[in-house]
Amino acid sequence: MKNTIKIPGIIILVMVIGLSIASCDEGEHELVGTWEHVSSYDGGTLRRTLTFNADGTGVQTDYVPGEGVMLQHWSWSTSGSTLIMKFDNGETNSTN
């Protein structure tokens, strides 16, 4: 189940955050802070927060009922209107 809720949720949240980059002139400064996404799956609810730190690091925190808290760390940057996230597991996601 972890992979089923992880990848689509990240993609959706990154797309929403990407839109916020494209809609502002300050880029990185607008991302710093914590973003939250709540979704339902198989009768449960996943609460995910993405925290973007000013130093270019970040952490995803998933609160999954019955499984506890799962953390994933990354580094992030922007290039124009593109958000680039490099996860500790080697994955890289980008959106604009």
Image (cartoon, grey):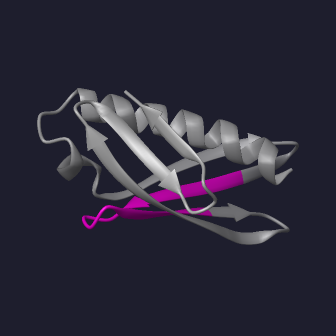
Relative to 92, say whether 65 is above or below. below
Rendered location of residue 67, percent (x, y): 82, 68
Q: Position of residue 81 (x, y in %)?
A: 26, 30
Task: Using the image as rendered, state which of residue 13 and residue 95 is in the foreground.
Answer: 95
- Residue extending farthest front: 90
- Farthest-out residue, left: 25
Q: Is residue 36 left or right of residue 82?
A: right
Residue 4 in picture, x, y percent from top left:
80, 42
Q: Residue furthest bottom?
A: 68
> x, y percentage for residue 26?
13, 42
Q: Is residue 58 magenta?
A: yes
- Give the quarter of the image for residue 55: bottom left
Left or right of 77: which side holds 37? right
Q: In the depicted view, which residue is nearer to us: 78 or 11?
A: 78
Q: What residue lies at 68% left-to-right and 68% top-to-bottom?
A: 70
65 w.r.t. 78: above or below: below
| In the image, residue 75 lies in the stretch drawn in magenta | no
- Looking at the magenta stretch, what is its main secondary structure? strand
Please give the range of residues in magenta. 46-61
Residue at image location 79% in from the left, 47% down from the top: 3
On screen, residue 85 above or below 74: above
Q: How many marks?
A: 0
Q: Nearer the viewer, residue 67 or 94?
A: 94
Q: Which quarter of the rendering shows the C terminus?
A: top left
